Amino acid sequence: MHEILYLSRKDVEALDFGMTDVIDAVEEAFKERGTGEAEMPPKPGVHPLHDAFIHAMPAYLPGISAVRVKWVSGYPENFKRGLSYISGLIILNDPNTGLPISVMDATWITAKRTGAATALAAKYLASPDSKTVGIIGCGVQGRSNLEALDAVMKLEEVRAYDISSENLHRYVDEMTAEFSIAVRAVNSPREAADGSDIIVTAGPILKHPSPIIEKSWVKAGVFASPVDFDSYWKPEAMLMMDKFCTDDLPQLEYYRSTGYFQNIPSVYAELGEVVAGRKAGRESPDERIMSMNLGVAIEDMAVAVQIYEKARRKGIGKELAL
């Protein structure tokens, strides 16, 4: 009888897989993608409600002999029900037989790997002297992006903004307690973005957004990571970028065909090409660079495989008959 290892969110979190480990795993996955070895089709999806999505995210990384799929949903109105915006499951398969070997909660992995992708892009594309980060959106991604950026940059100040004053002040209190960085609340997106070395926008993903970030807010030398696609960024602010990167060009083009990203710059490079050394990262201290990371399957896979292996070693999880 074939069995699979089930890992709940509590199980995944109990494994204490650190952010630096997540970043390292994601970096190796992007190197493999950059050399053309990874197989990762654009994620198909369905949209049961307005601005809600459920996506299937398959991938194969031959370098670590891993096959998996993530079934993930994003429902912007879930907060009204006391539910998470993002939820999902990851299924790992045996690459030799195709049989599933594990099913695990995807919520923790999705949060951490998204922050890790921002930090990885910043490692190659941000100014190494970056000290100030503006974070717009103080939910799960506002937290994980700061955690990951703190692991690769020597940050000194965070300017945080959220439409909910309650969320904002909770974020400031919690992040101040967790990191050795001055975290302060600001009253507007402009105060968060204007003059910051790094700008992270982490609101909900909207197909027809009302963007607000102006080009005049974006300083020379900035690195920008819109975790929420182009929801916050006006086209003229994006079009002024000297380099516009993405984690996956085919996926970006797929999204464009469905109505997203109707006015963006031409893509300079995929993140994997930069990580693998096939294209240059930052070449000037004054370059304005944006990395439009859409969230790709290889990130989840690289982390999920290590989570699975660690769970096996530690005897965490529950065996279920297939």
Image (cartoon, grey):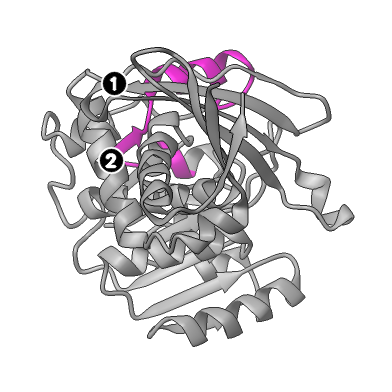
Amino acid type assigned to the residue bearing label 2 in the image = Asp
**Label 1 belongs to which residue?**
38
Whether pointer 2 and pointer 1 mark residues with C-beta atoms closer than 8 Å, the reply is no
Residue 224 place in picture, x, y as percent:
40, 51
Q: Quadrant of residue 103?
A: top right
Amino acid type assigned to the residue bearing label 1 in the image = Ala
Q: Which residues are magenta?
A: 237-261
Q: Residues within 10 Å of mark 1 (few under 14, many from 20)?
A: some
Q: Which quadrant is home to the C terminus? A: top right
- Front residue of 11 and 171: 11
Residue at the (63%, 62%) spot, across then down: 139
Residue at the (60%, 64%) spot, across then down: 189
Judged from the image, the secondary structure of the residue bearing numbered disc 2 is loop
Q: Residues within 10 Å of mark 2 (few under 14, many from 20)?
A: some
Can you see residue 197?
no
Residue 156 place in picture, x, y as percent:
34, 81
Which one is closest to the eye, mark 2 or mark 1? 1
Give the numbered dot on residue 242.
2
- Front residue of 279 and 75: 75
